[in-house]
Amino acid sequence: MAEKPAIKIGYLKITDHLVLGVTDLKLKKGMEKFEHCTLEPVVKNGWNEVADALSVKSLDGALVLAPTAMDLFKSGVDLKLLLFAHKSGSILVKSKKANIEKVEDFKGKTVLIPYQLSIHNMLFHQLLSEKGLKPGRATEPGIDVTLEVVAPFQMPEAIEYDDEGEIGGFIVAEPFGSQVVAQGHGEEFLLSKDLWPAHPCCVFVMRSEVIEKHPEAIQEICTSFVRSGLAIDDQPEPASVIGGDFLSQDKDLIKKVLMDPPDRILTGELFPIKEDLERIQKYMMDEMKIMTSLVDLDKFVDTQFAEKAGAK
């Protein structure tokens, strides 16, 4: 029998990627068995690392920001989007040193985002635009709020050491927001689900050549992710213990992210919804001007694995 391929999947230490952590643990503990591959999670520090690794093919697949995945596909990286990794799950935190009460108070401040091509950037843009404020990079003219890209794991420190209160806050995947709140440096301004309920954020992509070569393996992974997602929604307590371990975070912090409120992050519905992806790319093109053209989602999204996995 041929040796089973090791499928390398990139991820970040964020709650959004917990389905991978649960699947990984189930395999290690023998609670689940893959017939067609072995799973090799590869941790990365920031989104540019994930994007670069997909471009140079050092990863077979990844859990990655939906707009970033679309952009990679558009730039010629032959990827397929197979599942959503979760829905909702991010937070806008205001720094305690910045004296922010309402959206308008972010004016004149810097706000940290994890990546240009992120749902976080889009949701924050929407929030500010409704109040007539313009976010953008420091080099752009007529900007009210300066956006700075910082890797998620570096955000808590940036807030902690900003003595002048120049950073108004940040919008990012959990648990980094709740970590800053727990440390006493920031307060929850709002949850991403309040801006767009059950919004997509991270997606599971695989390189097309790997899918074509090992379809049974990819099916196994997708089916396991779907089950893991249902298990997390169903049993947040044990999931938070796994999460604490997988994400190197305090398990009580992860438990809060998974449970308070219950729809803060959803992992039970991983079926990829093209209309939601369409909404993201249209907004980024028409309103934000950070996408130059639209992706043909029928070519990019492959739902057959999600369907077979029974994804909701």
Image (cartoon, rainbow, N blue to C red):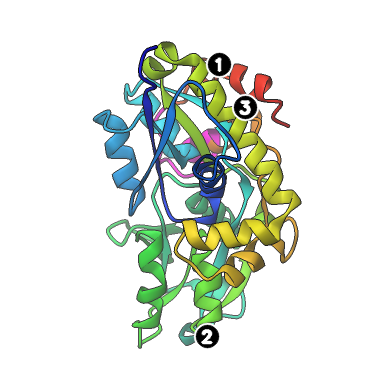
Residue 298, numbered label: 1
Q: Nearer the viewer, residue 116 or 35?
A: 35
Give the x, y percent position of residue 284.
Answer: 48, 40
Q: Secondary structure at mark 1?
A: helix
Question: Is residue 292 within the magenta segment?
Answer: yes
**Residue 233 drawn above or below residue 274:** below
The magenta-colored residue range is 281-293
Spot the residue most to the left: 56
> On the image, numbered disc 3 is attached to which residue?
274
Is the residue marked by circle 3 packed among few (<14), some (14-19), or many (20+) residues within 10 Å?
Answer: some
Type of the residue with mark 3? Lys
Q: Of circles 2 and 3, which is in front? A: 2
Is the residue marked by circle 1 packed among few (<14), some (14-19), or many (20+) residues within 10 Å?
Answer: few
Marked residue nearer the N-terminal end (2 or 3):
2
Give the x, y percent position of residue 138.
Answer: 30, 62
Q: Quadrant of residue 11?
A: top left
What's the residue at 44%, 64% (across, down)?
A: 248
Q: Quadrant of residue 301?
A: top right
How many badges with numbers are in the image?
A: 3
Marked residue nearer the N-terminal end (1 or 3):
3
Circles 1, 3 touching at the beta carbon (< 8 Å): yes
Q: Whole-Å distance between the Cαs marked 2 and 3?
A: 39 Å
Q: Whole-Å distance between the Cαs marked 1 and 3?
A: 8 Å
Q: Quadrant of residue 53?
A: top left
What's the residue at 51%, 43% (across, down)?
A: 20
Is the residue marked by circle 2 packed among few (<14), some (14-19), or many (20+) residues within 10 Å?
Answer: few
Residue 77, numbered label: none
Is residue 133 something one can see in this rendering?
no
> On the image, numbered disc 2 is attached to which residue?
184
**Residue 204 drawn above or below residue 29:** above
**Residue 46 drawn above or below residue 226:** below
Type of the residue with mark 2? Gly
